[in-house]
């Protein structure tokens, strides 16, 4: 007799995959449906914040109950002496891991709240209940933990998963596919695409991997850096019931475009007294202050000069550095996260950025999409993002009113074709101005009588996809010729192509100019 019945097997297999899947990929929804069957509650394919708690997945409680029910049934057979096959043993281990994590979720939420209140490095009494449940589910039936896993590390990984979900879910808002892809990329930057392998061996090695975040200015690269940095693995000590470090104070950020080379070196590497004029005392830099579980965020990495590039390359290659004015080698134990809005390929070709440094930086690359990409995929994204920003400005109770006010103002004054060159940062400024002045005047806003100049500026920006360029150009030529045939002759395409691509709203603005 099998330890897992034929009827249970599909759900157990799906649950085992769900235990280690990326929660921000569509795969999660399919797996939840396979586990729950008729009980599954359909929702958005893209899981994103809408002003609700991070656990606003209507299937979470049902998944936990189903996992426990399956685990108890299999455990009963194991205790009765049934011998599992290796495949059944692995499936039951994964199922038990899900049950164990589900049992810790509330304790981890409480721990994060206590850290946010500044409670030092609080004790975690919940570890005792976790250890007892692990003994009951895995050790007592003789199955044991997955290969290479130990209880303390599993508990630490559970807390890391909870933190990673919270930071990624709450700080990277939006229901568009580009936003969903960004959250999935962030999750992989933290755990790789294989969470099981991460928990076996990579948990202690990911700090050696530099994360490079690219994307236009204002697209939210600093939020990506925050999510990655605050979601690093932190060891847990079972004897003291505490984690080795706080998890909310481990990001050390440096905006390289705002400082002179000397100040960058001092902030990054530190200095000794007398190293330069004004260095009246020793000072530790971020590389020295950053703990092994922390991360140094170098914003606008494309701005640094050649001399600092050489020193930074040495840090990435050897994990060693010297403070200014010192010949002593110090070791950097943390993680480097860098960001840029520049095309580093162009910078390398023109000799402004070292090729060897680039290839050290890009072991893990995350691309933050522009706001225009997100709105093109999902126009409703605008309201979602405005609500996200409004909650941070005025709180949850006032946010819906401000959101309606801001969205209505944007629709009436900027329109759906506005390019948002400042991305989410500009949108944030817009919401603030609408709240204060009931008005917003972007420097890049074209006059109402110049739609052709606005089109030209968007073409030059280089952010429009080929299909969008063709749509707008067909509309522009048709507005000038007044004939599908003449427009098609000028463009060298079929008349039907022009007709299919003319945008009525854009055409109305062009003809009104």
Image (cartoon, rainbow, N blue to C red):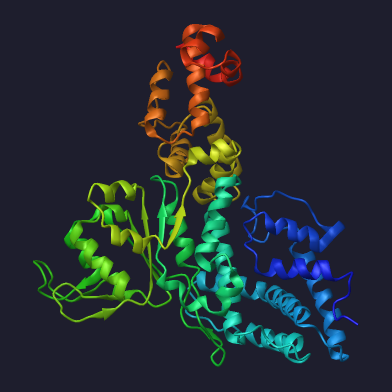
The quarter of the picture where the N terminus appears is bottom right
Give the side of residue 123 with respect to residue 326, left or right: right
Give the side of residue 402 with respect to residue 70, left or right: left
Viewer-side residue, 122 vs 469: 469
The quarter of the picture where the C terminus appears is top left
Q: Residue 312: give x, y in percent of width and height.
A: 27, 66
Give the side of residue 131 with respect to residue 469, left or right: right
The answer to whether any part of residue 141 appears in the image is yes
- The image quarter containing residue 105 is bottom right
Q: Residue 26: give x, y in percent of width and height.
A: 67, 54
The answer to whether any part of residue 111 appears in the image is no
- The image quarter containing residue 164 is bottom right
Q: Residue 458: give x, y in percent of width and height.
A: 41, 29
Residue shown at 36% from the left, 77% from the top: 333
Viewer-side residue, 235 vs 94: 94
Residue shown at 65% from the left, 64% from the top: 21
Above/below status of 152 relative to 250 = below
Q: Residue 85: give x, y in percent of width and height.
A: 79, 83
Above/below status of 185 relative to 84 = above
Above/below status of 27 relative to 18 = above
- The image quarter containing residue 294 is bottom left
Residue shown at 28% from the left, 51% from the top: 348
The mark tally for this picture is 0
């Amino acid at each position: 007799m099998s330890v897992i019945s034929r009827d249970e097997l599909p759900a157990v297999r799906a649950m085992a995959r769900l235990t280690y899947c990326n929660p921000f990929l569509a795969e999660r929804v399919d797996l939840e449906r396979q586990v729950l069957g008729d009980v599954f509650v359909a929702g958005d394919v893209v899981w994103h914040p809408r002003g609700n708690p991070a656990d606003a997945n209507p299937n979470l409680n049902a998944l936990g109950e189903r996992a426990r029910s399956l685990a108890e049934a299999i455990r009963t057979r194991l205790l009765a002496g049934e011998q599992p096959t290796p495949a059944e043993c692995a499936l039951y281990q994964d199922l038990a891991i899900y049950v164990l994590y589900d049992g810790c979720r509330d304790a981890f939420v409480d721990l994060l709240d206590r850290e946010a209140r500044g409670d030092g490095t609080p004790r975690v009494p919940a570890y005792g209940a976790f250890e007892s449940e692990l003994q009951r589910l895995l050790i007592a039936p003789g199955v044991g933990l997955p290969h290479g896993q130990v209880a303390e590390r599993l508990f630490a990984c559970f807390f890391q998963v909870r933190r990673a979900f919270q930071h990624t879910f709450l700080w990277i808002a939006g229901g568009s596919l580009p936003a969903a892809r960004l959250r999935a990329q962030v999750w992989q930057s933290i755990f790789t695409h294989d969470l099981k392998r991460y928990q076996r061996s990579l948990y202690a090695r990911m700090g050696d991997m530099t994360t490079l975040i690219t994307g236009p200015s204002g697209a939210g690269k600093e939020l990506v850096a925050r999510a990655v940095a605050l979601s690093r693995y932190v060891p847990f000590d079972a004897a003291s019931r505490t984690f080795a470090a706080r998890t909310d104070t481990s990001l050390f950020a440096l905006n390289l475009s705002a400082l002179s080379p000397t100040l960058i070196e001092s902030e990054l590497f530190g200095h000794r007294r007398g190293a330069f004029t004004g260095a009246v005392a020793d000072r530790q830099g971020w590389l020295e202050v950053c703990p092994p579980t922390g991360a140094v965020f170098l914003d606008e990495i494309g701005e640094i000069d050649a001399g600092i590039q050489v020193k930074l390359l040495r840090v990435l290659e050897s994990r060693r550095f010297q403070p200014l004015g010192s010949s002593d080698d110090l070791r950097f134990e943390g993680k480097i996260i860098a960001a840029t809005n520049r095309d580093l390929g162009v910078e390398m070709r023109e000799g402004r950025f070292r090729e060897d440094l680039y290839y050290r930086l890009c072991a893990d690359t995350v691309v933050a999409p522009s706001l225009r990409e997100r709105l093109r995929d999902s126009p409703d994204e605008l309201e979602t993002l405005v609500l996200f920003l409004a909650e941070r400005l005025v709180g949850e109770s006032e946010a819906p009113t401000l959101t309606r006010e801001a969205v209505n103002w944007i629709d009436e004054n900027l329109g759906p074709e506005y390019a948002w060159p400042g991305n989410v940062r500009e949108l944030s400024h817009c919401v603030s101005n609408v709240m204060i002045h009931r008005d917003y005047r972007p420097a890049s806003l074209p006059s109402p009588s110049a739609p052709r100049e606005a089109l030209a500026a968007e073409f030059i920006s280089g952010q429009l996809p080929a299909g969008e360029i063709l749509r707008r150009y067909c509309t522009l030529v048709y507005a000038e010729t007044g004939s599908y045939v003449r427009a098609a002759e000028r463009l060298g395409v079929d008349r039907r192509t022009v007709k299919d691509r003319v945008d009525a709203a854009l055409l109305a603005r062009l003809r009104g100019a």
